[in-house]
Amino acid sequence: MLVTGSDGLERLAADGTLVPYADLHAVSPFGWNEVIVDPRGYAFVNNINFDMMGTGMDFEVGSTSGVVAVVTPAGEVRQVASGLAFPNGMAVTADGSTLVVAESFASRLGAFDIDAQGGLSNRRVWAEVEGGADGICIDAEGAIWCATQQGCACVREGGEMLQRIPVELPAFSCALGGPDGATLYIVANEWKGVENVGKGPRTGRVYTARVEVPRA
């Protein structure tokens, strides 16, 4: 499945074309951001819920308008969380019980319990992360790697810092992969403000680093 702007979710068909999977307009008219699927097939999708590019609404620095929607295996769509401070990366714990959401404007990882119907409850702070919080991934021991303005940080629930990997540019996403799942891939890029998105030279880079604990 792919997040495709304000349309919501699409899936890649066998012939390589994109076909609609879930229409999320009823939850928010703005662009959708990240998607994660739990072990039971519930797809969680987040949205900053304002127009970041400023067409019709100013860039709301500090906004807590973000939402999370769930798409059930039966295709039902509903909002399950609100009041998020620019939701970005998401991860689900290995047992499927907890959704973790990076909140960039708050420099933290928030957590929710996931119930049997894909609902979210018991909102709490999973960990504070210095330097913002963007894309995330979870390792086999339940620690989370989080992209920040200085690189990537690995933290446990409660905030214990396990490791930092600095990179030259602000990091925007990360993923554990490779043959043994122990290579951390870090996507980074220059940031010159929302008004310059899509302008100027392409400066994106992918960094790799070996880590001790593989992906979940």
Image (cartoon, rainbow, N blue to C red):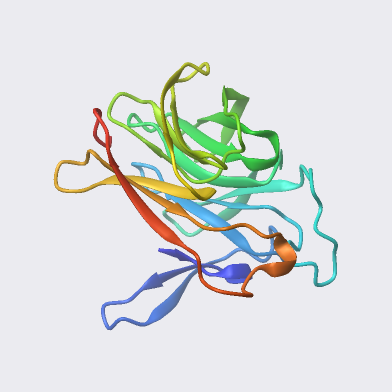
Q: Quadrant of the C terminus?
A: top left
Q: Is residue 36 left or right of residue 50?
A: left
Q: Quadrant of the N terminus?
A: bottom left
25 to 71, vertically: above or below = below
Residue 123 placed where, x, y %?
62, 26
25 to 140, vertically: above or below = below
Relative depth, front residue between 107 and 31? 107
Figure quadrant of residue 8: bottom right
Q: Is residue 102 left or right of residue 42?
A: right
Residue drawn 65% across the image and 64% down it: 31
Relative depth, front residue between 101 and 170? 170
Q: Is residue 8 left or right of residue 55?
A: left
User: Can see residue 72?
Assistant: no
Figure quadrant of residue 187: bottom left
Residue 32 placed where, x, y %?
60, 60
Residue 80 placed where, x, y %?
62, 42
28 to 207, vertically: above or below = below
Residue drawn 69% across the image and 68% down it: 196
Residue 24 placed where, x, y %?
61, 63
Residue drawn 72% across the image and 55% down it: 49
User: Can see residue 27?
Assistant: yes
Question: Residue most toward the front?
Answer: 168
